[in-house]
Image: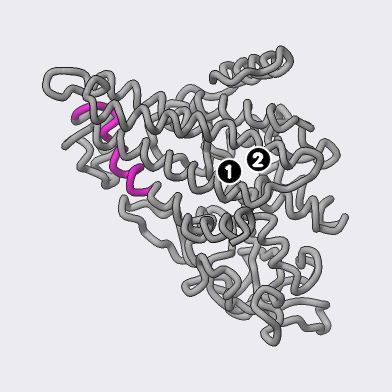
Amino acid sequence: MDLNFTPQEEAFRAEVQGFLKDKLPKELAAKVKAGQRLSKGDQENWQALLNERGWFANHWPEECGGPGWSPVQKFIFDNECAVAGAPRIVPFGVNMLGPVLIKYGNEAQKSYWLPRILSGADWWCQGYSEPGSGSDLASVKTTAQRGVDAQGDHYIVNGQKTWTTQGQHANMIFCLVRTDKSVRPQSGISFLLVDMNTPGVEIRPIRTLDGDREVNEVFFTDVRVPAENLVGEENKGWTYAKYLLTYERTGIAGVGFSVAGLEKLKAVASRAQRNGKPLDQDPQFAARMAKVEIDLENMKTTNLRVIAAVAGGGVPGAESSMLKIRGTEIRQEILSLIRRAMGPYALPFTDEAQYAGYAEAPVGPAEAATAAANYFNYRKLSIFGGSNEIQKNIISKMILGL
């Protein structure tokens, strides 16, 4: 990092670096840096190490179990973790649902759900997108009908969610559901917490190009949900959904992961050869590397400005859409350049090619094993969390007033 920090901030950075040196398992960091898939256990172990130090929910207020960090401290922590090869925090519970509960949940919900997020007792996934409601999220059709019987006040949920990331691991899902069809779409949505072990919930995997099961479809058939699992007010879920998405889009920018990716790209380009010279001396390739580095430096500054906007309990504004666009474009360009640097060695992208026998007999440079799979997988960055085209519409309306 080449940003100017105060002596106190530099001391904090040294503390984070010391923690990562002592506590981040070397084999786990190696998997992350190689671009290999992490197991649920890998992610849970890292979360537990962070929670033990009190750093897991690093953007939560102290009274809710967070460390009370400044925006710059959060920025430093995220970047140092990425450069060290720490796993990306699974965001759905701690980074998405947590802020919604803190701002809009009642005291009973906060006292029950927040500690379970910290401890890892619950693994959350996100029930937003539907087959016909992706970027047009306000058109969700999954319904929740309220009723009261001998067992108490409840909702009956019916519908389908799709692209549910890591839903195969989750025991809980937060959902946008339609509770009123008689009003305009944004006004009839509620925010509901659903136990995925409830009868009527079915998960079906969506196999991706590289054979992974990262995303899923989730079906709800007469699923009974206690009314106490409604967050905030009924039919006000669109407000909560927008609040959550600003956090998601800021996180998707992934500044730290781009910093780590750029370091990897430079190392790869210094070793790969073209016409008998290192690839980083090729004018065309070097020009693309220089451009992505300049874009990344600019985004670091913008990221700090947006993060600072949430200090004191605020929320990122439409600027988070700018970060989402530029951040995803930068990460995709870095992955594209790494794949290009591998040449024909990057052609395999199946599970067998990536992992079967590579430890004993690698084919080509070590980076080639996952270059194509990561390139293809992260094409999704510019789609999920609200497609980049939709983010440009938000910028046009909210910032430019068009």
Q: Is residue 219 left or right of residue 353?
A: right
Q: How is the image coloured?
A: one colour
Residue 369 lies within the magenta run: yes
Closer to the chain start, of discs 1 and 2, is 1
Q: Amino acid at mark 1?
A: Gly
Q: Is residue 90 left or right of residue 287?
A: right
Instruction: Return the residue at label 1.
Output: 251
Q: Is residue 37 above or below residue 220?
A: above
Q: CA distance from mark 1 to mark 2?
A: 11 Å
Residue depicted at 40% across the width and 33% down the height: 292
Res. 167 in view = no
Q: Nearer the viewer, residue 201 or 373?
A: 373
* Tally of marks: 2
Which of discs 1 and 2 lies nearer the camera? The answer is 2
Whole-percent x, y for residue 393 in the image: 54, 60
Q: Specify the principal SS of the magenta part.
A: helix
The quadrant in which the C terminus is found is bottom right
Tell me the SS state at disc 2: helix
The answer to whether the residue labelled 1 contacts the one labelled 2, judged by CB atoms less than 8 Å apart, is no
Q: Position of residue 392 (x, y in %)?
A: 51, 56
The answer to whether residue 126 of the structure is visible from this angle is yes
x 54%, y 18%: residue: 2
Q: Residue at x 85, y 58 (%)?
A: 106
Q: Nearer the viewer, residue 375 or 45?
A: 375
Which residue is at the front of the view, 380 or 203? 380
- Give the amino acid at mark 2: Val
Start-end of magenta stretch: 364-377
- At a point 40% along the width and 47% down the height, the residue shown is 378
**Residue lying furthest right in this view?**
107
114 magenta-colored: no
For residue 306, the mark is: 2
